[in-house]
Amino acid sequence: MRLAIREAERALEHDDVPVGAVVVHEGEVVGTGHNERELRQDPTAHAETLAIREAARALGSWRVLDSVLYVTLEPCSMCAGAIVLARIPRVVYGTTDPKAGAAGSVVDILAQPRFNHRPEVAGGLLAAECAALLVDFFSPRR
């Protein structure tokens, strides 16, 4: 999660919301990403999608099996969908997202029994540090 926090801090360099993600496959980092929506002017350029794309390229497969996705903020519905489609077996997130969280806060896409894949999910790892990044980012803007 510390690597994901470092990724989130990189988003601040281009004034994006500080969210970071890291995909670890069998103990090795195979994908990293941080929010680049503002940088790319792309609504899909979330930390998780960028990290998953990089991991898939590194593994040579759209199935990102035997991996863990670490992300500083609970995934949104788009990212949760990408996690399910990539067959990522485990997701660990930092802080919850009470406005758009799709791992239990608003909806729970990752536990949807009708999908053919349901990853193991753990939340709250380094939650205070992850939340502080967001609070510090949004405080002067509100």
Image (tube, grey):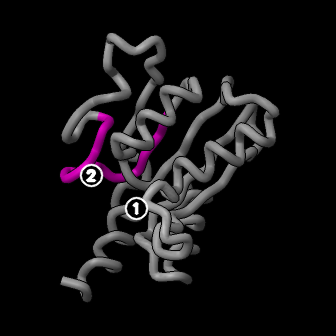
Q: Give the range drawn in magenta.
A: 91-103
Q: In this view, does 12 lie to the left or right of 127?
A: right
Q: Could you tell me how far apart the alpha carbons at marks 1 and 2 are, in whole angstroms?
A: 11 Å
**Above or below 103: residue 44:** below
Q: Are marks 1 and 2 in contact (CB under 8 Å)?
A: no
Residue labelled with disc 2: 97
Q: Is residue 28 rendered to the left or right of residue 115?
A: right
Amino acid type of the residue tagged 2 in the rendering: Asp
The quadrant of the rendering that contains the C terminus is bottom left
Q: What element carries label 2?
A: loop
Q: Which residue lies furthest to the bottom in this view?
A: 140
Mark 2 Cα shell of 10 Å, populated few (<14), some (14-19), many (≥20): some
Judge whether residue 25 is colored magenta.
no
Can residue 9 be seen from the camera position used here?
A: no
Instruction: Residue at 51%, 58% (x, y): give it.
Output: 45
Q: Which residue is drawn at 68% across and 40% down?
A: 24
Amino acid of disc 1 = Cys
Residue 57: where, in percent of width, then height?
A: 77, 41
What residue does disc 1 label? 130
Pinpoint residue 63: horizontal percent, then vertical percent.
Answer: 67, 25
Q: Nearer the viewer, residue 93 or 88?
A: 88
Which quadrant holds residue 4?
A: bottom right
- Counting residues from the start of the chain, the first of labels 1 and 2 encountered is 2
* Lateral position of residue 127 relative to residue 23, left or right: left
